[in-house]
Image (spheres, helix red, strand yellow):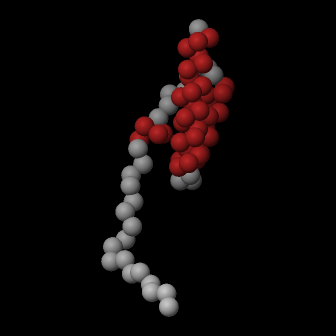
């Protein structure tokens, strides 16, 4: 027979690290602007995986601006 496990406390929810959503879009860059828009839409619908992915793309794309200058 299978015995059920009863938990006395709710599961622990860890906070999201703020740096995962950081990333400053470069002004006048259409790619950065589109990624920033994707990030803001994802945040509004509480899709944190998509918001973090867009922020990561902004950070990585921003490095390419430094090399082109």
Determine the image quadrant of residue 27: top right
Q: Is residue 16 above or below residue 2?
A: above
x, y percent for residue 6:
39, 81
Left or right position of 20 against 36: left
Q: Residue at x 60, y 18 (%)?
A: 64
Q: Residue at x 53, y 53 (%)?
A: 46
Q: Is residue 20 visible?
A: yes
Q: Residue at x 39, y 60 (%)?
A: 13
Q: Is residue 40 visible?
A: no
Extreme residue toward the bottom, this view:
1
Question: Number of labelled discs?
Answer: 0
Q: Residue at x 37, y 63 (%)?
A: 12
Q: Is residue 59 above or below residue 8?
A: above
Left or right position of 7 against 65: left
Q: Is residue 69 above or below residue 24?
A: above
Q: Is residue 12 above or below residue 47?
A: below
């Amino acid at each position: 027979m299978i015995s059920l496990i009863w938990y006395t406390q709710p599961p622990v929810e860890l906070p999201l690290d703020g740096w995962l959503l950081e990333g400053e879009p470069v002004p006048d860059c259409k790619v950065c602007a589109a990624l920033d828009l994707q990030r803001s839409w994802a945040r509004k619908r509480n899709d944190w995986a998509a918001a973090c992915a867009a922020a990561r793309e902004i950070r990585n794309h921003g490095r390419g601006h430094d090399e082109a200058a």
